[in-house]
Image: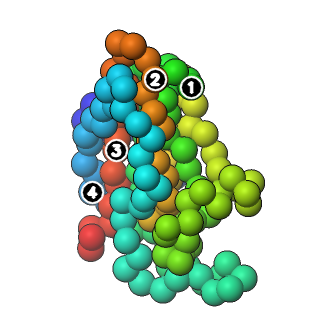
Amino acid sequence: VRLLSHDAPWVRFIDVMLPNGWNVAVSVVYSYPGAKNQEWHADGRHLDRECDFEGCGAAPPYGICVFMPLIDLNYDVGFTQFFLKSHKTSKLIGFGEASHILNASYDGILNAGQSVLYDYRLLHRGMANNSADVVRPVLQFLYTAPSY
């Protein structure tokens, strides 16, 4: 996992987005059978400027998450749902359900080994694990600027 965190295909993107270097932490996020939908949330808060009314001017990222499931994700075992572009402002916190009305939600249904990258400030939620006996393990790589 340590080698993957430094040599994965997404590392070139991380280098561009965090140009002053980065640190990485790796963990495993589990969802057990019977787990319910999570509430919409952002793992990281806004530390600097936010976008204006037109969506311009947001601070660059200080953290980027990579989710990589260890099993195939589907509507039975669940997945992570993302509110696109919600990383630009904290004013969307509490309005996660609006992502559907705004056509701004993305269902992260991935095969084992595929990945999705997102700004640490992006609103997201884990969806229910409706399976009878399948635990959903997802590797989480958190790349952060050295100043974080």
Graded by Cα atoms within 10 Å as few (under 14), some (14 to 19) or many (20 or more), the crowding at tag 1 reads few
Instruction: Give the label, 2 or 4, closer to the camera.
Output: 2
Which residue in the protein does label 1 denote?
A: 75
Mark 3 residue crowding within 10 angstroms, few (<14) / some (14–19) / many (20+): many
Mark 1 or mark 4: name the one nearer the start of the chain: 4
Which sits earlier in the primary sequence, circle 2 or circle 4?
Answer: 4
Disc 2 crowd rating (10 Å Cα; few below 14, some 14-19, many 20+) is some
Q: Earlier in the sequence, mark 2 or mark 1?
A: 1
Name which residue lies at 54% across and 44% down.
Answer: 81
Q: In the depicted view, which residue is nearer to us: 74 or 112?
A: 74
Q: Where is residue 25 in the image (x, y as percent from the top left)?
A: 25, 48
Residue annotated with mark 2: 130
Q: Which residue: 67% across, 78% down?
A: 55
Question: Mark 1: which secondary structure?
Answer: loop
Residue at disc 3, secondary structure: strand
Q: Name the residue under label 3.
A: 141
Screen quadrant of the C terminus:
bottom left
Percent x, y of residue 41: 42, 59
Name the residue carrying label 4: 23
Give the structural element (helix, strand or loop) at label 2: loop
Residue type, numbered disc 4? Asn
Q: In front of the other: label 2 or label 1?
A: 2
